[in-house]
Image: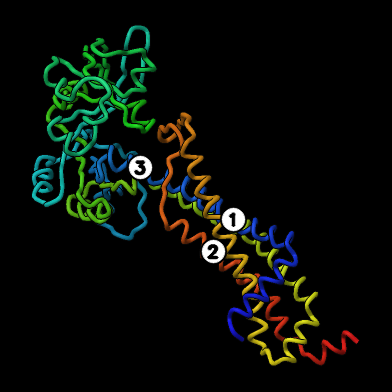
Amino acid sequence: MPAPLGLAIAARHLSHRRRQTVTSLLGVALGVAFFIAIASMMQGFQQDFVNRIIDSSPHVTIKDEFRTPPRQPVENVYPGATIQLRGLKPKDEVRGLRGGRAIIAALEQIPGLKVAPTLSGNALLRYGPKDSSVNVIGIDPDKERLVTKLEQDLIAGKLEGLYTAANGIILGEGVALKAGIAMDDLVSVVSPEGVVLRMKVVGIFRSGLTLTDNFDTYMLMKKAQVLQNRPNVINRVRIRMDDVEQAEALAKSIESRFGYRTESWQEQSSNVLGIFVIQNAIMYSTVGAILIVACFGIFNVISTVVFEKTKDIGILKSMGFRDADIRRIFVYEGLMVGCIGVLMGWALGYGLVEFMGSLEFKMEGFVRAEGFVLYRTPKHYAISGAMGLLASTFAAWLPARRASRMKPVDIVRGAA
């Protein structure tokens, strides 16, 4: 059977039942369009969040703690024995990275790495009658600008202000707003050790990460060590890499070498990245359900055509059409509905994405955003098109297979 003849017969069948055909087309088009719009919105948010983490935070962090607690001496002497220890007290020692300078020197020898030491701890920020709990991070500004985007995130002041002021401090925008603090104001910072420093606000930053903006503050390393009464101590080493995808492998290598707990940005954000997997599963399930409904429409249309055109099938077979020819006609119908529905869905999906991109609103959560963050890629159109065509073809194949098995003699007898 020539292909044009099969296509002409298929088109004639579809045009004969216009209302049902239009319904099937809309089902495929809506499934394709919603996939494009939802995928663009979800993956846009996901990529924006990951980019914010990668840009504003170090890729690898070495902490002054161990992934598993050290074994007690008695456990080393009697390995595998049943031992009960009572009255154990933690050793009283100053926490921090032992040999921190040696660790930094070793890491700086690795190409593609930028390293910055920090000392972080909790403190109380007091401004007038308002007290705020904050995270104080002591930094070396010259190295910090190589590891994080703190300097670019400043919306007021400069990073060099930490050097020029006697006791300078940089606040997150959320910290400043909650306490009503402005540039050049004097605040009191009280550490758990009881040390109080009177400090001048020399900068305010906005990273876009709500937790960071609401709790983090920065000061010079020496000031943080005085505030926490931990002279010459660092408890974090933060690393930035040229190839962020190698962060997990590097973290494992550093932890096995130095023993300290080392976390990559993937591990630190594993809970959120796990949510992204669930989001994608919901997205594919939703679009799949829409396409399944569209499949039932296509199946219903073609099954009805097969029932109505029973006599025509018998005539075509008596004229020499083979089973494969009959099957091909009805598969053509499914493909035609799929192709036209996919094209309509692409146009509708493009319109939905552009419409969502024009909306403006403020969103608070893990990150701040002013409107939908959309990820536009031809891959979404290709995936949705393939899903639409596959669903349409499968829905047409079942009734087409039944039609091809009909025998002309049985058709004539049934008609008689």
> Residue 257 is drawn in which quadrant?
bottom left
Image position, residue 119 (x, y; %): 21, 31
> Could you say which is closer to the camera, residue 121 or residue 46?
46
Q: Quadrant of the N terminus?
A: bottom right
Q: CA distance from mark 1 to mark 2?
A: 9 Å
**Residue shown at 54%/56% (left/top)?**
284
**Residue shown at 59%/78% (left/top)?**
4
In the image, farthest residue toward the top: 128
Q: Tell whether label 2 touches label 1 (CB within 8 Å).
A: yes
| Amino acid type for the residue under numbered disc 2 | Met
Horizontal arrangement in the rendering, residue 400 relative to residue 222 (left or right): right
Q: Comparing marks 3 and 2, which lies closer to the viewer?
A: 2
- Classify 10 Å Cα crowding around label 1: few (below 14), some (14-19), many (20 and above): many
> Could you say which is closer to the camera, residue 116 or residue 254?
116
- The secondary structure type at the circle numbered 2 is helix
**Residue shown at 27%/54% (left/top)?**
245
Q: Earlier in the sequence, mark 3 or mark 2?
A: 3
Label drawn at residue 401? none
Image position, residue 59 (x, y; %): 26, 45
Horizontal arrangement in the rendering, residue 278 relative to residue 262 (left or right): right
Say which residue label 2 marks: 387
Image position, residue 382 (x, y; %): 46, 61
Say which residue label 1 marks: 31
In the image, farthest residue toward the right: 416
- Classify 10 Å Cα crowding around label 2: few (below 14), some (14-19), many (20 and above): many
> Residue 164 is drawn in which quadrant?
top left
- Classify 10 Å Cα crowding around label 3: few (below 14), some (14-19), many (20 and above): few
Say which residue label 3 marks: 86
Q: Quadrant of the C terminus?
A: bottom right
